[in-house]
Image: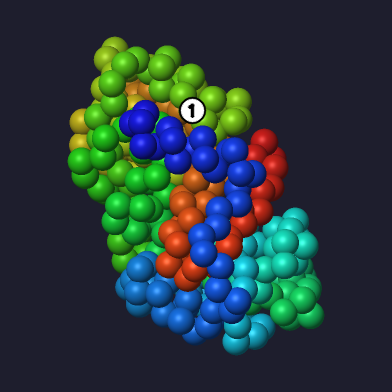
Amino acid sequence: MPDAAQERHRRRRGTGGRYTCAVHANASLDEIVAYLDGLLEVQKFASEVGSNGLLHRAGPGVSKIAVALNTSLTTIAGAVKAGAQLLVVHHTSWPGIDLHLHDEKLQIMGAAGLSLYGAHAALDCAPGFSTGWVLAELLGVSVDTTFLEYEGGQAGVAGSCAGTFADLIQRARELLRVEVEAHEHAKSFGRVGIVPGGGIWTSWMDEARRLGCDTYVTGEVSMYTRMFAKECGMNLLIGTHYATEAPAIRALGERLSAHAGIPCEFIAESPDVF
């Protein structure tokens, strides 16, 4: 992994996910939203309803930001405990997934004065700092192209990687801090396709294969993905949905904190579960 990426990782681990700059007493929620909307180009992802942009407004000012992968009861409670007025997430609360918990979560945030901003496909497809780009940098993959059309952008990245597949597995274990699942099927190693999170579709893996990738990295798969990798002769590395996407939302929080001049805290969940 490049030295700069290693240093950023050490800084984040050393502060427990907290990163601050010169603190302003209060920042405008509307100004923060405008910055994020522009940075993430959320207008490109309008078809992904209820997933990108400001999703719940609780107040006009923000003195602290929290970021998290999911809009879980754990992260909502953590953001409130941290004293945040804005929670920025990759996975918002979707009514079709959270069911009766969706309204409960919104009620808790409303009572606590916590606004919610979602960056789902907009972050998955953000050029240079997407979930794929950030994971690639962390794992030592030099991105040279993107693939996988997704909600208005491209959610996959591909590039070269030095060393062996075993080296990549070891880096993933150390830096993602989970016990990754790995299957070695390729005769050679050196080109890696990455789709963080739920990269379960064989068609996505095949896009990476057709770009010359001998290895496919994702967060979670199905029986069919494992079978396809074996029969196509591709290496497969699975690092959990949570662990493969959390680095990007942490990095977004760091960028937002520097821009707004207010502290930001990453609210951790359980990577072995999610």
Q: Residue at x 45, y 62 (%)?
A: 258
Total numbered circles: 1
Q: Is residue 70 left or right of residue 163?
A: right
Q: Is residue 263 above or below residue 47?
A: above
Q: Which residue is labeled 1 in the image?
A: 172
Q: Residue at x 77, y 76 (%)?
A: 112
The extreme bottom residue here reads: 60
Q: Residue at x 54, y 43 (%)?
A: 12
12 or 181: which is nearer to us?
12
Q: Position of residue 126 (x, y in %)?
A: 34, 59
224 or 221: which is nearer to us?
221
Q: Residue at x 24, y 29 (%)?
A: 160
Q: Is residue 222 left or right of residue 236?
A: right
Q: Is residue 77 above or below residue 45?
A: above
Q: Is residue 137 above or below residue 228?
A: below
Q: Position of residue 183 (x, y in %)?
A: 46, 20
Q: Callout 1: 10 Å neighbours few (<14), some, many (20+)?
A: many
Q: Three-letter amino acid code at disc 1?
A: Ala
Instruction: Please say whether residue 237 is visible from this viewpoint.
Output: yes
Q: Quadrant of the C terminus?
A: top right
